[in-house]
Image (cartoon, rainbow, N blue to C red):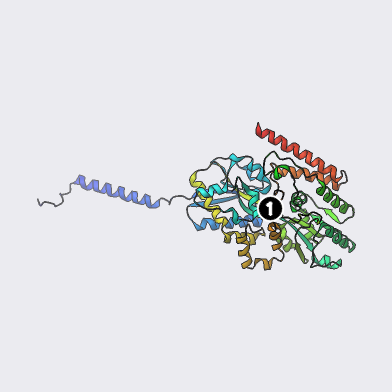
Amino acid sequence: MIVGAPAPSSPETATMRRILFRAAALALLLTLQQPATAAIEIRFWHSMTGTLGERIEEAVNQFNASQAHYRVVASYHGDDAMGAAPGATSAGPHIIQAAEAATGTLLATRHVFRPVQQVMAEAGMRLDANSFYAPVAAYLQDHGQLAALPFNVTTPAFFYNKDAFAKAGLDPARAPRTWREVQEAALALRDAGLGCGYTTSWPAWIHLEHLSAWHDEPVATRANGFDGADAKLTFNGVMLIRHISLLSSWLKSRIFTYAGRANEGDARFSAGECGMLTTSSSAYADVAGRARFAFGVAAMPYYDEFPHAPHNSIPGGSALWVLSGKNASEYRGVAAFLAFLSRPEVQAEWHQRTSYLPTGPAVFELARQQGFYETRPGFEVFVKQLVQRAPSANSRGLRIRHLPQVRAILDEELEAVWNGRKTPKEALDEAVERGNRLLDGMHKARLR
């Protein structure tokens, strides 16, 4: 036998080799058939329908196509995404879109969410609050860091019908600056035959929260709730009593038309029924698409006898909140998705395709370079009034729990004024009393 030569194969050895070969081939086949490591799913609950819902899906699809580690699944859950979410558990959403009115409630229940700036930092990603406009960041900051990511930002806006102004002998190139000038324009429009000189959408937000901030006047104690959850409402002061009294007199003179609590005024303006409108800046695209007349955009009116007016307008809209109860890998996916949404080029596309405001100067500048504001005359006004002054303790907005319920109380009391059942002072006094009873009860329940 030659040393080193293979031993003759026995029948048993040959059979074993065939078995081992087949096993190896089967193992290789199974390996090839196994899918690659599955992407980690990130659930995103939002409140956008129609075209806006489509825009969200487009952004999500762009992110999913840009990498293979995570897969964001977006789904519509209405305005009450927070209420529908099954708490801070592994089964619930990772990210929810919550309206700005929910900020105080969310911050009062800290176990439910994780600060977005902390989530980003833990994933090794930087989120700079200074990249956002100061009023936008200030509204969402808590203990020195961003609690949520600014997403779709709005602010109150003033629209007027240039064709109707010209017909009434008013200068269509000059919008009213003060509320007294709004009155003069509304009277001229009425005398020219227009049945509705002025209307408004979102009356509680615009004529309470924004008007107070615009004049650097407080709405509640404790820096409008930013310095403590035990804030008390105090908006029944001289300025708001005067303002609601003025609107009440306009209603009697048939130069102001009450359209409803939400955005009903937008349709009346776009149809040419009303010559002037205060609403959300997000109405721009809809007005531009529906109006069959030339319209103008201007800064919100103010009372020039107040020395600090106009101050800065307040941000509305919604933000993206990260919920608790997930694992580290999932939070890295959340951070990656939010970092993607925060890119200036992604934000600029979102801003231009939705008519929401740019969230910061880099986004604004990119949109300007891309020619967006040339196609949206007047849109820059919204941004300028938002940032024209650094936000004060009175102009950051209103951060109280259960703000939607407080707004509903105010709407009810304002309707009592429009119906002639209460004076403006009676209605505002009652709104403050009812609102404080609500807040006090909620605060005591939380402390128990």
Q: Nearer the viewer, residue 367 or 261?
A: 367
Query: What is the count of numbered marks?
Result: 1
User: Residue 288: percent from the left, percent from the top?
Assistant: 73, 63
Please tell me how crowded label 1 is: few (under 14), some (14-19), or many (20+) other residues with Cα within 10 Å.
many
The quarter of the displayed image where residue 430 is located: top right
Q: Is residue 49 visible?
A: no
Which residue is farthest top? 448
Q: Secondary structure at mark 1?
A: loop
Above or below 23: residue 270: below
Q: x, y (%) of residue 215? A: 76, 53
Residue drawn at 76 percent across, 44 percent down: 408
Residue 225 appears in the picture as rendered: yes
What residue is pinned by disc 1? 391
Foreground pick, 212 / 350: 212
Q: Is residue 124 above or below residue 435?
A: below
The answer to which of 31 and 105 lies nearer the viewer is 105
Front position in the image: 161 or 49: 161
**270 horizontally vs 360: left or right:** right
Question: Label 1 sits on what residue type?
Answer: Pro
Which residue occupies the extreme left position in the image? 1
